[in-house]
Image (cartoon, grey):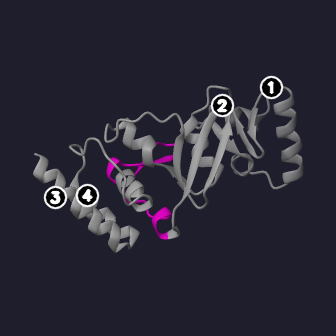
Amino acid sequence: MGSLLKTLYTASQSVFTLREIALLGEEKNLAALRSRVFYWVKSEKLIRLRRGIFAKSDQYDRNELATRLYTPAYVSFETILAREGVIFQFYDSIFVASYMSRETVIGGQKFICRKMKDTVLSSKEGLIDKGTYFEASRERAFLDLLYFFKDAQFDNLRSIDWVQCQKLASIYQNKRLEKAVSIYQKEYAQQK
């Protein structure tokens, strides 16, 4: 096995873009790299998930793939809120904040990218580094969903840190969102 392929197999990430493979191998000749990667795919040493995106095996991390589709990106919205128990609906799609809106299906998994404005997308506040990708904290996912859907419905707001929400709301530079956070916070306080 070549040293670059060995580097890929020992890396912590399970999904790679062609650009990431070039950086890992310090490869300057992209045509030669493409040929080598194509050979690895043909000989089943790598899996081609989509043009320019590859995995070490079919056991790749779906969240990692979601953030590689249209970078920069991070996992957010219903994916995080359902996992954290803020909404009770089940979603089999993975929702991602990105620089463009798109829906894509790869390997039977649906990925929904929602376009986030650059100032929000580039802010690391409220994001959790998972090592090979970023995902929103519960508060950032709550704000992301409110930013897109002013009438969003939530089932359980007990776990929301309202101080953190108020702090994070400023990165959106959106008065409607800040007002909505205050309303949700007051409604939650009355329910206690």
Q: Mark 1 points at which residue?
A: 44
Of callouts 2 and 1, the N-terminal one: 1
Q: Given this view, does label 3 or label 1 mark the residue nearer the observer?
A: 3
Q: Given this view, does label 2 or label 1 mark the residue nearer the observer?
A: 2
Q: Where is residue 165 in the image (x, y as percent from the top left)?
A: 27, 59
The number of numbered discs placed on residues in the rendered structure image is 4
Give how far apart the Cα atoms at labels 4 and 2 are.
Answer: 36 Å
The circle on residue 164 is 4
| Residue 127 part of the magenta-drawn span | yes
The circle on residue 108 is 2
Magenta range is 119-139
Q: Is residue 79 above or below residue 171?
A: above
Question: Disc 1 on helix, strand or loop?
Answer: loop
Q: Nearer the viewer, residue 154 or 110?
A: 154
Q: Mark 3 points at which residue?
A: 186
Circle 1: is it few (<14), some (14-19), or many (20+) Cα within 10 Å? few
Question: Disc 3 on helix, strand or loop?
Answer: helix
Residue shown at 42%/58% (left/top)?
149
